Amino acid sequence: MRTKTSQIDHIIVSTYGIFCIETKGYKGKIYGKEYSKQWVQYLSNQKNNFMNPILQNYGHIKALEAILEENYPNMVYHSIIAFSAEANLKDIEAKSASICKIAEVSDTIKSLSINEIISKEDVDKIVKIIEDNKSMQTDFSHERDIKKLKKENEEKIKLNICPKCGGKLVEREGKYGKFIGCSNFPKCRFVVKDKKLD
Ligand SMILES: [Zn+2]
């Protein structure tokens, strides 16, 4: 496993795919939705907006994908958003990213390391490609990225692919009846909330 820092806070290339980690040092209560442009931070007497970090990381992942897709079209990208210990994360639901505290990043990576998809030699090759593309430009357009991310998540769910870990979505039985969730449970806790069972 090799780590590199660039525009993306951290990129970890491993045999389980590429982990893109966006770290945020915000304190206070944090509210946000996957497809909203801005998230909100509440401090005792202050309210601040900041850019949706899922979307921000999505843009970074798209830039990485653009330089790797020729050689690695089936690469799996894991989006991790890590907040400081002082952040109070309120009702944040994310389909395509894992939201955690900075101290939990390594556990989150472990939990997403389910299927090995490339060899150690490929890891070295990918690190080299990324290093050779240091000028990697991200072309941000939030409106477009929100639509793209939403569409991608919907398409994956339609194909029974977990948008969080790339695993399979299967029918599972829980306390409250049947539902569609990730077959990699309990490592991945993704659940489809808006898909009806026939
Ligand atoms: Zn999953």
Image (tube, grey):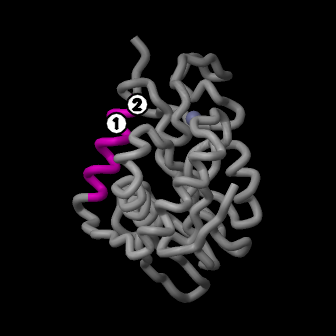
> Of 198 and 187, which appears nearest the observer?
187
> Of 54 and 31, which appears nearest the observer?
54
Q: Which residue is mark 1?
A: 154
Q: Is residue 192 left or right of residue 122?
A: left
**Mark 1 and mark 2: span between their CA atoms?**
5 Å
**Marks 1,2: beta carbons within 8 A:** yes
Q: Is residue 151 magenta?
A: yes
Image quarter in which the C terminus is found:
top left
Question: Residue 146: horizontal and vertical position, in percent?
Answer: 30, 56
Classify 10 Å Cα crowding around label 2: few (below 14), some (14-19), many (20 and above).
some
Residue 92 visible within the image: no
Q: Is residue 123 above or below residue 50?
A: above
Q: Is residue 59 above or below residue 150?
A: below
Residue range corresponding to the magenta coloring = 145-157
Q: Is residue 183 left or right of residue 34?
A: right
Image quarter in which the N terminus is found:
bottom right
Q: Which residue is mark 2?
A: 157
**Could you tell me what secondary structure mostly forms the magenta stretch?**
helix
Ligand 1: does it lie within 8 Å of the C-beta at label 2? Answer: no
Task: Tell me what residue is drawn at x 58 percent, y 36 percent.
Answer: 117
Task: Tell me what residue is drawn at x 28 percent, y 50 percent.
Answer: 148
Identified by mark 2, the residue type is: Ile
Question: Which quarter of the picture shows residue 43?
Answer: bottom right
Task: Tell me what residue is drawn at x 52 percent, y 42 percent.
Answer: 164
Q: Is residue 25 above or below residue 195?
A: below
Task: Tell me what residue is drawn at x 63 percent, y 33 percent.
Answer: 115
Quadrant in which ligand 1 is drawn? top right
Question: Residue 121: horizontal and vertical position, in percent?
Answer: 62, 46
Identified by mark 1, the residue type is: Glu
Q: Is residue 33 left or right of residue 110?
A: left
Q: Secondary structure at mark 2?
A: helix
Question: Which quarter of the picture shows residue 87?
Answer: bottom right
